[in-house]
Image (spheres, rainbow, N blue to C red):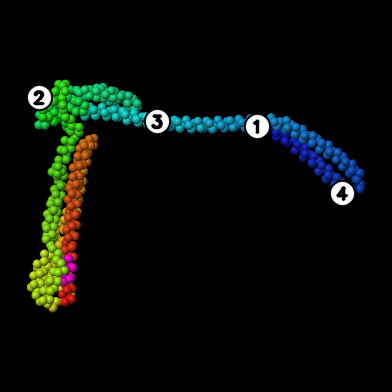
Amino acid sequence: MIRPALQQQPACGWRRSRASWRGLCILAAVLFTIAPDAFADDRQAALAEALETARAERAEALEALEQTRERIAEEKPGLAREFAETELELREKRRLVRIARTSLADREAEVRQLERDLATRRQDATYLAGLLKEHALRTDTLATPGQPMLDLAPEAVVPDTADPASTLDARLPVIDAAIDQLEALLGGSTQSGRAATPDGEILDGTFAAVGPVSWFASADGRIAGEARPSRNGEFPRIHPLPSAAPVAALTAGEPADLGIDVTGGKAEVLAEVEGGFVNLIRKGGLWIWPILFLAALSLAFGCVKFLSLIRIREPGDAWINAILNALDAGDREKAAGLARDASHPVGPVIEKLIALPAGASADQAEETLYEQLMSVQSRAGSLLPVIAVTAATSPLLGLLGTVSGMIATFNLITVFGSGDPKPLAGGISEALVTTLFGLMVAIPALILHAFLSRRAQGIVETTERLGLAFVNGVRGR
């Protein structure tokens, strides 16, 4: 606010002095021009006076300028210090603003990271709570006979709540109950109950559970063996042992030597599921029978065709030469006999050519040859289309059986749901049996058809080659 006022004063003083000098000069010039003689003295006096006035004004202006410069010089250090302080204050405020902005971004990033960690911890808590609930339910549901149940209050397996941490805290007693159950199983536990024999008889007795295996000994001592849960949820099934004494000793708390099925009965079930070739046929359902019919048809036709083709023996060029020599000798009967003796379709063809009249032309002989070749080709390729049809139809029937089986499986899913995958897997495996049999029929049928077709084509080519050799030999002679 001080600097503008100090800067205006020197400028005004200079302007006034310059304007005074200019006015005086113009006035002197005018007077000198108008009256150079009359006003010479007055002009000189006026000019002298104006010069003095101008000098006085110039001195005042210079003095004012010097005073202004002195005031500026006095005020400049203070203004410089004030400007420097203001600049430092501005820099500090800018730094604080930058720090505030950076801190805000860091805090927001940290808050977002904490939110992500919280979501992860909630997911972990929900997952662990689900595992505990599943363990409790599966342990009580799939427990083998004689095993102690989990000592849990009903409210331990609570429904899922909005707070995963609360749900997890409520299900932590499942761990203690499971540890207590394992300790009881390691030492063995006994329990009275009822079990079913393989004949369906229900017997009272005692279960002895050691680890994941349970045994049952009837109260009358007639039967004893490994006890396994029933599939339909009824009484456990007994797999009898040759002697009931070891199980009776075990239930009495005495040492016993017993065998353990490490597969938990799965090996026996797997053997029942596989069941061999006959069981596969039974699983195939309705569509397995057309596939088996096509297999029998392809096998029968293939065997007949194979036997008919292996009896054919290909004659050589000496055979054709012998026939031509007999014709040259005029012995048509001998030539026809040689043709009939050939175990090859070319024999009847050559015999037909020999039977042509003596004056028949070579063109007529060639036409007769190609006419006979068509008959040979038809006989050589007989039954092969049937084998090709069986090879092409068997996979389609297998696919049809699979699709129908899958439809039946999905109908079961619609009615009973998909909670247990075992029945679904069994239905799907049975549906795929027809595809298996279709491929088992199609692949050998394709190989057989390719082999027999190649053999038949070779017979036709040999017939054509030997027939042309005969015609050319007759024409040359």
Q: Which of marks 3 and 2 is nearer the N terminus?
A: 3
The residue indicated by pointer 1 is 83
Label pair 1/3, CB-CB below 8 angstroms: no
Image disc number at residue 117: 3
- Is residue 338 among what the camera can see? yes
Numbered tag placed on residue 221 in the rendering: 2
| Residue depicted at x 19% and y 28% | 213
In the displayed structure, 108 sits above or below 353; it is above
Q: Gap between marks 2 and 1, in whole Å?
A: 112 Å
Residue in the picture at 81% in, 43% down: 22
The residue closer to the viewer here, 462 or 280, is 462
Of callouts 1 and 3, the N-terminal one: 1
The one nearer the camera, 201 or 37, is: 201
Q: Is mark 1 on a helix, strand or loop?
A: helix
Q: Distance between the residues labelled 4 and 3?
A: 103 Å
- Residue depicted at x 32% and y 29%: 128
**Where the C terminus falls, by quadrant?**
bottom left
Give the number of the mark in front: 2 or 4.
2
